[in-house]
């Protein structure tokens, strides 16, 4: 019987590919047999991340800003031209933005978070979907957050943006009814990462992300690893998840269970 967790012959397009969750996911999708098209705005970090991929992944690195429509149209058309299509789209690039109470938040900073986290996710789906619909198959996985499910002090704008990602995911999943395209999102919790450290430091200067007061609120009693988010994304990407669409998968060690 064929292994339906494999991605042999599939093309996986990943945004935010130079970041911690993006690069861990890229590695796992490549290990499962996918060809990789990696997108990030940080050209140097992107080249470093792509250099770690196996040659069998035939990696292609594309520098683009996901909040600019011409860049998004460009990375999709270059992926199709170079790799022949897009079977899996990990729509993952995101920023935490400023970490501050709402009364201190500038409108410019507010707009920048929405531009990357919401407009970027919208544009990615807008330009990738026609490719998948033409093919009658595909899996889109957007990156939301547990901050898209519950409130999160001092990152209210980030939280609003991730609530929007969940709404986009569910709505587009319904729009794709009967097409063979599945649309889901992942909601990572507290993942050991630069982004988490930045948020914790912004809230309480000098505080540690793995402080007891934080871990006590997580049933798993530890922070998550980027590789643990990657394994849920890899599941949603493959045919083993053939009946999964419109879902928001928490990867949070139980943090939002109560
Ligand atoms: N780290 C966590 O604890 C955590 C928790 C929940 C959700 N998330 C989400 O997971 C995703 C990845 O986060 P991460 O921890 O890997 O962060 P990261 O900062 O390590 O990676 C994000 C990547 O996105 C890229 N990027 C940012 N803006 C971009 C733009 N406009 N165009 C193209 N690329 C851009 C960055 O250059 C970076 O490489 C984000 O959407 C984030 O909101 C992270």
Image (cartoon, helix red, strand yellow):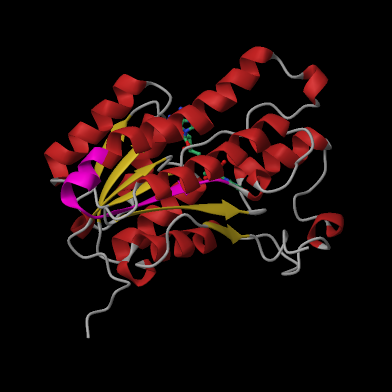
Image quadrant occupied by the C terminus:
bottom right
Residue that lies at the very extreme toward the bottom in this rendered image: 1
Residue 40 at least partly seen = no
Above or below, 121 relative to 87 = above
Residue shown at 74% from the left, 19% from the top = 105
Q: Quadrant of residue 71?
A: top left
Residue at position x 72%, y 64% from top?
222
Q: Quadrant of the N terminus?
A: bottom left
Asked if residue 134 lies in the magenta stretch, the reply is yes
| Residue at the image position 17 percent from the left and 50 percent from the top | 135
Q: Which portion, as a residue range, is magenta? A: 130-144
Figure quadrant of residue 137: bottom left
Residue 8, position as x, y percentages in the image: 21, 65
Q: Residue at x 41, y 37 (%)?
A: 45
Specify whether residue 153 is in view.
yes
Q: Which quadrant of the structure image shows residue 68?
A: top left
Q: Position of residue 202 (x, y in %)?
A: 76, 33
Q: Is residue 120 left or right of residue 34?
A: right
**Residue 182 percent location from the top left of the image:** 36, 55
Query: Is residue 149 depicted above or below 239 in this figure?
Result: above
Nearest the viewer among 101 and 138 is 138
Please indicate whether residue 63 sits to the left or right of residue 113 in the image: left
Q: Residue 75 or 256: which is nearer the viewer?
A: 256
Above or below, comparing residue 180 to residue 155 in the picture: below
How many numbered circles does the render carry?
Answer: 0
Residue lying furthest right in this view? 213
Asked whether 102 falls inside the magenta stretch, the response is: no
Q: Position of residue 256 (x, y in %)?
A: 72, 59
Q: Is residue 92 above or below residue 210?
A: above
């Amino acid at each position: 019987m064929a292994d339906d967790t494999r991605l042999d012959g599939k093309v996986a397009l990943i945004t935010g590919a130079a970041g911690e969750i993006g690069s861990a996911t890229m590695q796992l999708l490549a290990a499962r047999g996918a060809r990789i098209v990696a997108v990030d705005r940080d050209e140097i970090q992107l080249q470093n991340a792509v250099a770690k991929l196996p040659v069998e992944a035939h990696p292609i690195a594309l520098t683009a800003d996901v909040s600019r429509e011409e860049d998004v149209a460009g990375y999709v058309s270059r992926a199709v031209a170079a790799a022949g299509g897009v079977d899996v789209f990990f729509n993952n690039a995101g920023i935490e933005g400023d970490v501050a109470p709402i009364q201190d938040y500038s409108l410019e900073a507010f707009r920048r978070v929405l531009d990357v986290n919401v407009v970027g996710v919208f544009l990615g789906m807008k330009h990738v979907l026609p490719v998948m619909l033409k093919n009658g198959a595909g899996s889109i996985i957007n990156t939301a957050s547990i901050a898209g499910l519950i409130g999160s002090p001092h990152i209210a704008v980030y939280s609003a943006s991730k609530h929007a990602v969940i709404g986009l995911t569910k709505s587009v999943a319904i729009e794709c009814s009967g097409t063979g395209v599945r649309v889901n999102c992942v909601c990572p919790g507290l993942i050991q990462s630069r982004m988490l450290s930045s948020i914790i430091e912004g809230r309480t200067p000098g505080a540690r992300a793995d402080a007891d007061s934080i871990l006590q609120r997580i049933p798993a009693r530890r922070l998550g690893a980027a590789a643990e988010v990657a394994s849920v994304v890899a599941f949603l990407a493959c045919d083993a998840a053939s009946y999964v669409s419109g879902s928001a998968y928490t990867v949070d060690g139980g943090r939002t269970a109560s």
